[in-house]
């Protein structure tokens, strides 16, 4: 049994801890109002485009068994070792919040026996979680929109998937503020030769590398050294062997087909020989649409992806060539200047009456307006009319509708344009005609 003093201390301690939990967790975001509207607008814009390419939506759990990511992303990868939210559930199983979407999609396709008929073209849109240092465009909870083209080896598929990404960015009017970087990680034969060349190169310079890159070297994660952003590593990376010298003929021809296909379609790109992407499962074509802002020291990757062929095998299936990309919705919202159009909104005020209850009629009018697609707020207050009109202003309503005894007797409503201040009376019998005019989206 605890003493009274001990119990008092514990109560204060628990109370202090409880107060801390009332704050938003660092790196997470609350979304509301215009911010939420913009994020949904970006996602819906992408969805409207990828569905025209034949992609169908897939939804996977936010929680997966940890071994899915250890096998697909690599047990020595930075994501698995440092960034995943991993814990044991009540059954003692190790589970993790998904840090990316591709592994879950491939697992779901295998689980659902959806790879018997190929190709499969799917897209997803959801929350991902990584324990990273929060900064511009980087959060611990973030929204990703991604696509996966499963089961086709042709380089023309790579071209189509990259072009689709280009169209998505153009639809948001951000493509001109990005630069497309592409590279190839070759086939298995090419990567074995190149990793051996990197091992030989870095082994004689190991002490000059940053501590993080030294750890990657020890783990055999040699390609990830080329992705280092540490200033200490940059000179060594620039002088490192180039992948092009170690490409097999097959891998080289495939990448040539991708480049020529993009050129023929007028897609500008930069061949970035140091682009390796951050996940272990990539092969052949990899690409990033990077923020093109000279004033920014760290360029954000807004949309990135590439080919992979061993991921299905890692979840118990057969080797299968795929290509996909994922876009950071939070990052795109930072650059996106377009705003979604919104329906006209109205505020209905039943005026005070000593002879009848005007609320049922006001409610009837509100429901008819809502059925036509209008946003309708109904005043439930009985305060001063001036305060109710201020509420309509605060809600940014386009029109205010007044219904009083005089309007009721004449079977009319009085409509005020909140921007111009003009007012007009409209008969109930004519409301259907007016509804369709007011329902046009604002621009």
Image (cartoon, grey):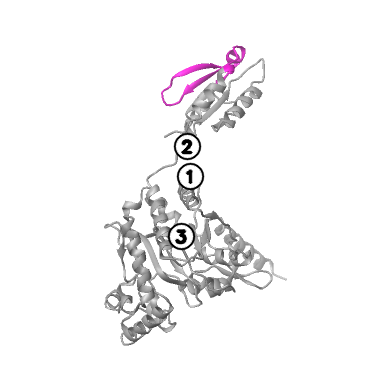
Q: Secondary structure at mark 1?
A: helix
Give residue 435's quadrant in the image. top right
Q: Secondary structure at mark 2?
A: loop
Q: Which mark is residue 37?
A: 1
| Callout 2 touching callout 1 (CB < 8 Å) | yes
Q: Tell me residue 167's x, y (percent).
A: 40, 51
| Residue 407, above or below 65 | above
Magenta residue span: 402-429
Q: For the image shown, how many numbered marks are present on the structure?
A: 3
Q: Position of residue 323 (x, y in %)?
A: 46, 65
Q: CA distance from mark 3 to mark 2?
A: 27 Å
**Upstream in sequence: badge 1 or badge 3:** 1
- Distance between the Cα atoms at labels 2 and 1? 9 Å
Instruction: Tell me whether the residue at label 1 lies in contact with that at label 3, contact meaning CB atoms closer than 8 angstroms.
Output: no
Looking at the image, can residue 380 be seen?
no
Looking at the image, is mark 3 or mark 2 nearer the viewer?
Answer: 3
Q: Residues within 10 Å of mark 3 (few under 14, many from 20)?
A: many
* Label number found at residue 189: none
The one nearer the camera, 245 or 410, is 245
Residue 264 vs 193, above or below: the answer is above
**Residue positioned 58% across, 74% down in the render:** 67
Label 2, residues with CA under 10 Å away: few <14, some 14-19, many ≥20: some
Residue picked out by circle 2: 342
Residue position marked by numbered label 3 in the rendering? 326
Q: Which corner quadrant of the image does residue 337 belong to?
A: top left
Above or below, comparing residue 377 to residue 107 in the picture? above
Front residue (pair 224, 36): 224
Which residue occupies 36% across, 80% down?
194
In the figure, is residue 273 to the left or right of 443? left
Residue situated in front as seen by the camera: 345 or 429? 429
Q: Earlier in the sequence, mark 3 or mark 2?
A: 3
């Amino acid at each position: 049994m605890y003493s009274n003093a001990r119990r008092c201390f514990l109560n204060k301690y628990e109370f202090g801890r409880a107060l801390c939990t009332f704050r938003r967790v660092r790196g997470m975001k609350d979304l509301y109002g215009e911010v939420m509207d913009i994020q949904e607008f970006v996602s819906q814009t992408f969805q409207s485009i990828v569905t025209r390419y034949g992609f169908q939506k897939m939804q996977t759990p936010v929680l997966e068994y940890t071994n899915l990511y250890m096998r697909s992303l690599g047990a020595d990868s930075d994501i698995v070792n440092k960034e995943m939210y991993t814990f044991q559930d009540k059954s003692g199983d190790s589970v993790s919040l998904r840090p990316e979407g591709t592994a879950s999609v491939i697992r779901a396709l295998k689980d659902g026996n959806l790879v018997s008929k190929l190709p499969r073209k799917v897209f997803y849109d959801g929350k991902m979680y990584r324990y990273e240092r929060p900064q511009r465009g980087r959060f611990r909870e973030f929204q990703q929109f991604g696509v996966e083209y499963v089961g086709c080896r042709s380089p023309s598929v790579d071209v189509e998937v990259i072009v689709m990404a280009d169209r998505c960015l153009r639809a948001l009017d951000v493509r001109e503020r990005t630069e497309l970087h592409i590279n190839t990680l070759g086939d298995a034969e090419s990567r074995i030769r190149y990793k051996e060349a990197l091992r030989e190169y870095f082994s004689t310079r190991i002490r000059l590398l940053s501590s993080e890159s030294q750890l990657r070297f020890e783990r055999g994660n040699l390609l990830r050294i080329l992705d280092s952003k540490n200033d200490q590593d940059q000179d060594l990376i620039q002088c490192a062997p180039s992948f092009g010298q170690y490409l097999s003929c097959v891998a080289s021809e495939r990448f040539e087909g991708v480049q020529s296909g993009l050129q023929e379609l007028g897609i500008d790109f930069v061949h970035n020989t140091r682009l390796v992407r951050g996940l272990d499962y990539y092969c052949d074509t990899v690409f990033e649409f990077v923020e093109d802002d000279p004033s920014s020291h760290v360029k954000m990757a807004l949309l990135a992806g590439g080919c992979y062929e061993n991921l299905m095998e890692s979840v118990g299936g057969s080797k299968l060539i795929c290509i996909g990309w994922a876009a950071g919705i939070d990052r795109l919202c930072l650059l996106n200047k377009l705003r979604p159009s919104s329906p006209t909104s109205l505020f209905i005020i039943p005026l005070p009456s000593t002879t009848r209850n005007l609320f049922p009629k006001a409610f009837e009018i509100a429901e008819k307006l809502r059925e036509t697609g209008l946003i309708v707020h109904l005043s439930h207050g009985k305060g001063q009319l001036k305060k109710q009109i201020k509420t309509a202003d605060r809600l940014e309503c386009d029109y205010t509708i007044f219904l009083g005894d005089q309007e009721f007797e004449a079977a009319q409503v009085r409509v005020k344009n909140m921007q111009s201040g003009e007012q007009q009376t409209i008969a109930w019998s004519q409301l259907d005609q007016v509804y369709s005019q007011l329902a046009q989206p604002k621009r």
